[in-house]
Every structure is written in structure tokens, then in C-alpha cells.
Amino acid sequence: MKIQWNKVTWYSKGVAIVLFVATFFLGMWIGMQYQYALDQYVTANMDMQRTPLFINHGSFTNQKCGGFINNAPDCPANYHCVLGSVPDKGGVCVHD
């Protein structure tokens, strides 16, 4: 069988259509991967900005205490536990 270079065959048309559709879906997949990575970067960057660089461990204000759990944390001397609206969740330490 001799190749006819000036004739478009049915299988060359099929291959062209498959390549066109595959290129479209590959581009969509790459775009979704890029958007997912960008969302992860933005979320991580926002978390880093919200996290304080220096945490004052000398103050016990807003330290969690009490609650209906095993080994619930207690407040240190000169502080008392103020429970929230749901006592089972516990409360925070407040200076006397």
C-alpha cells in the first residue's frame, strides 16, 4: 500500500480530534493544580500572618482551665477560672 500524502484519512482525522480534546483536558487539569497550589499558599501565608511571633508565657490571662475532661488544667496562684456559657467546655483564667 502506497502512502498518499495529499489525502486526509479517517484515522488521521480521529487522531487529530483525540489530540485536540486531550490537550484541552490536560490544560484544564494543569490549571486546577495551579489553583489548588495557589490556594494552599494563600492559606499558609494568612496563617503565618495571624500567628504572633512572640508569645508572652508570663501572663496566664486567657489560659484555658476547667471543663468536663480528664486532667483539666488549673489556674495558677492569684488567678481563678471563669467558665463560659457551656461549662463542659471549660473557661479561662482571670487575675484576682
Image (cartoon, grey):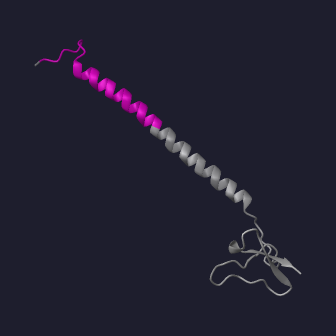
Say above or below: 83 vs 45: below
Q: Which residues are magenta?
A: 2-28
Q: Hey, which quadrant is residue 72 in on the image?
A: bottom right
Main secondary structure type of the part rendered in magenta: helix
User: If the image is split into quadrants, where does the C terminus sit?
Assistant: bottom right
| Residue drawn at 37 percent across, 32 percent down | 22
Most extreme residue toward the left, as rendered? Answer: 1
Q: Hey, which quadrant is residue 46 in on the image?
A: bottom right
Is residue 41 highlighted in magenta? no
Say above or below: 61 vs 20: below
Lateral position of residue 5 relative to residue 46, left or right: left
Say above or below: 37 vs 52: above
Most extreme residue toward the right, as rendered? Answer: 96
| Residue drawn at 74 percent across, 84 percent down | 74
**Image spot of residue 73 (x, y percent):** 70, 82
Of residues 18 and 73, the one nearer the viewer is 73
**Image spot of residue 24 (x, y percent):** 42, 31
